[in-house]
Amino acid sequence: MSLTVSHRAQNITPSLTLSIDARAKEMRAAGLDVVGFGAGEPDFATPQFICDAAKEALDKGMTRYTPAAGTVALRQAICDKLKRDNGLDYTPSDIIVSNGAKHSLYTIFQTIIDPGDEVLIPTPCWVSYPEMVRMAGGIPVFIPSDESNNFIPTHKDIASRVTRRTKAIILTSPSNPNGSVWSREDLMFVANLAVTHPFFVVSDEIYEKLLYDGAQHVSIAQLGEQIKNQTFVVNGMSKAYAMTGWRIGYVAGPRIEIKAMSAFQSQATSNPNAMAQYASIAALNSDQSCVAEMVAEFEKRRNVMYERINAIPGLSCLKPQGAFYIMLNIKNILGRTYHGRAIEGSMDFAELLLAEKQVALVPGVAFEAEGYCRLSYATSLEQIVKGLDRIEAFVSELG
């Protein structure tokens, strides 16, 4: 037998968002003044009371293994949160806590997908969705959308891609990478489709608290007992509480599948970090003013970025309703040149912008959205203004 990397591993595409963020950090380490619009990570410090809870956990000696699915106390706190915020009734047996929401998603697909199963993915989509599906032996089936419908696919486009091999659809609202929010009407259409055929719904709700202009979050699991029994509600601590490095995500879902996920996780990683679990209880059970303060600041940044982009000739964007991303439309400058180098796509734009103006953003091709680039406004207003000044200068120099 030859000593080679598996075909499965060879076919996995590395995360372009993490690659660009790593390159920007390398440039900073080399002394360059890089403005980073790439990574989806709040720039706020984790609230002090959450850090204090982690220290308390250490003082109490909570440094040992917990149940693989997470402590009962944290799973109960998650149940309480889901009841309080979403009107959803779960018990701790319906919950699994993982090493971040990304790990939660990975374990879902490893648990429900057999080789050849199809998973519907509305686009633009987060870079890891299709790769996670492929890693489980599944087939991503993309459902396109664009600015004309606020990056929400039409009912016709969704229904036309359902086949006998459809195992699940992935919903993300508010969305990474475009900040769109699914309406109750659109979610109800998907719910009816899923119940009729049937297939699972994987509802990624990690950005649910980051909403603007009165937008309301609706979980598809709220729309009836049947669809709730087919839905995996995915959430975590990273975005709303600035806890990206703490690596706590969770899933609420149908008990048989959650039990299977717990068995899978017990063999793959065992339990999530014990101290972070304890701190997450404090975050979920606390007054949520810390979240409201971050959301207010994100909204200010969004407004500045939105207005500045639409004032640059050749560029445009929609105003996102949630999360902390903007999809920058670059279609009107494709085909132009920068000092003799042609910009044929989003990758060219992103690479030239980083090399020439030291601004890092993510090309839309990473999200199945050529003609766009994603900017994160999870950075300071000062950095946003500086970065957009550089983008404006870059565009003004195009031939």
Image: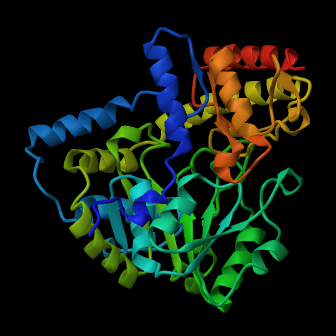
What is the x, y in percent for residue 295?
59, 36
| Quarter occupied by the N terminus | bottom left
In the picture shown, does residue 165 fall above or below 292?
Answer: below
What is the x, y in percent for residue 231?
53, 76
What is the x, y in percent for residue 38?
58, 33
In the image, 209: left or right of 179? left
Q: Is residue 83 visible?
A: no
In the image, 357: left or right of 245? right
| Quarter occupied by the C terminus | top right
Taking the spot 63% from the left edge, 14% from the top edge, the residue there is 382
Q: How is the image coloured?
A: rainbow
| Residue reaching furthest to the front | 2
Q: Quadrant of residue 135?
A: bottom left
| Residue reaching furthest to the top | 31
Q: Quadrant of residue 342?
A: top right
Taking the spot 86% from the left edge, 31% from the top edge, the residue there is 315
